[in-house]
Amino acid sequence: MAATDRHAARTTRKRPHRIVIVGGGVGGLGLATRLGETLGKTGDAQIVLVDRSPTHFWKPLLHEAASGQIDPATHQLQYAVQAQRNGFEFEQGELAGIDRAEQLAMIGATLDADGREILPARQLAFDTLVLALGSVTNFFGVSGAAEHALPLESVAHAEMFRRKLLDACIRANHARRTNPAQATEPVSINIVGAGATGVELAAALLDTVRLLNRYSLFALDPVRDFRIRLIESSGRILPALSDEISDRAQLMLDSLGVDVLTDTHVTEVRADAVLTHNGIWLTSDIAIWTAGVAGPPVLGVLDGVVMNRSAQVLVNRALQTTTDTNIFALGDCAACPSHSADAFLAPRAQVAHQQALFLARAMKCRVAGHALPEFTYRDAGTMVGFGNKGAIGSLSGLRARPIFIDGWLATVVYRLIYRKHVMTLTGFPRMMFDTVSHWLRGRAHPLIKLH
């Protein structure tokens, strides 16, 4: 039976149309929330969100979690609570495969830290499947990178980096105290990749080491005892953004004391060093890889899914996969055509957000049996944060050309982006309570997480 015939047969049944969304990131959770509020609460469709984690965390905040400037636990949203409030269901688990003929999503078993089964492997029937699996770090085959360079994909990675940073500071501080006359190597942190994540992490780390200096356990000189390098293979930092933003960001990093190495290719990563293409060894206490992303490995084993060179699912302008009209994809895992020929939209949070808004409308059309619209991306601009130094960026759509902004206005816009995300998911009153609670917490607790 053809995919369209199977869809028609299923829609004639009495049970509601079942939409299964796999992945609870910006796009997946946003889509589940909107569809739950509309189709779910009215009974026109059954909405199911699947994610391997029980909580949602906004990935653009990961650099602040990694630098210890926020406590991730206070910024996480529980999927079960969000589902109960917004008319959808939540299933914890990880996608293992798809049976397109039977329209089944295979969910793997969920295990605890000791390897014991919490939830068994199971199958979820769907009429429509939406892949919102996000992305994983692309190490580009660099020797030792996967083993010795931390990625920054999740709260667990951010916490691992933060713990390594604190441990390195304690060791270096102890060495300074016990042998004050002996020269001690600075704590060296190598960030590979000078996109927005790498640049923001470098700036945040400079703020962190200055805050750590207040406490005797970590009392190292922020200038003498730390070396933060930002390593980029292209000719400038923030290569995906405008020259104006890149140049201003370079000046800000220079003023902060970050060593920026452009036109530098990393050829090997070891436990204690990073090797570049010109044979230079850069000492390394911690290496973190922010140089690129690719689609999750599970996409490569899914039945009939076609991918591009970055392991992203090929979709048309309605965000349907090219092989099955009952399967959609959005966000970082989707290769969505852009306005340029032979190009795809970049993996950015605002792309996933706009695609979620689009699919929330498109799914109403699909359930009602109407033709699907086509997705059009509108760039709203880009903001890059530099911790206490503020933010810079551009706003698009207000004039024919993007408007560059910095200073207090850029800082306000940068902070409002996250609050807008929270408001989209929880509503204005809860967003305001959340904002006030974070403000109060910042005055009752240390400015840096020390444990």
Image: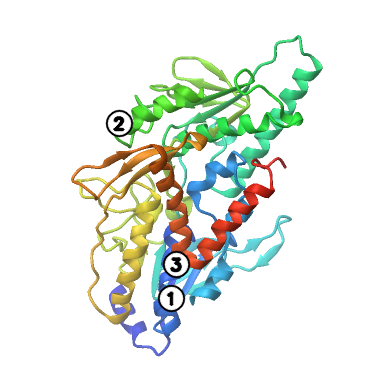
Helix, strand or loop status at disc 2: helix
Q: Quadrant of residue 219?
A: top right
Give the label, 1 or 3, closer to the camera: 1
At 31% across and 73% down in the image, what residue appears?
3
Badges 1 and 3: C-beta atoms under 8 Å apart?
no
Spatial CA distance of label 1 from label 3 is 15 Å
Q: Which mark is residue 21?
A: 3
- Amino acid on which the number 1 mark rests in the picture: Glu
Q: Quadrant of the N terminus?
A: bottom left
Along the viewing direction, whichever of 220 and 378 lies nearer the viewer: 220
- Amino acid on which the number 2 mark rests in the picture: Glu
* Label 2 crowd bin: few (<14), some (14–19), many (20+), radius 10 Å: few
Along the viewing direction, whichever of 7 and 398 lies nearer the viewer: 398
Q: Position of residue 225 (x, y in %)?
A: 64, 20
Helix, strand or loop status at disc 1: helix
At 68% across and 43% down in the image, what residue appears?
446
Give the label, 2 or 1, closer to the camera: 2
Q: Position of residue 309 (x, y in %)?
A: 34, 44
* Label 1 crowd bin: few (<14), some (14–19), many (20+), radius 10 Å: some
The residue tagged 1 is 37
**Horizontal side of residue 259 vs 180, given as left or right:** left
Q: Earlier in the sequence, mark 1 or mark 3?
A: 3
The residue tagged 2 is 244
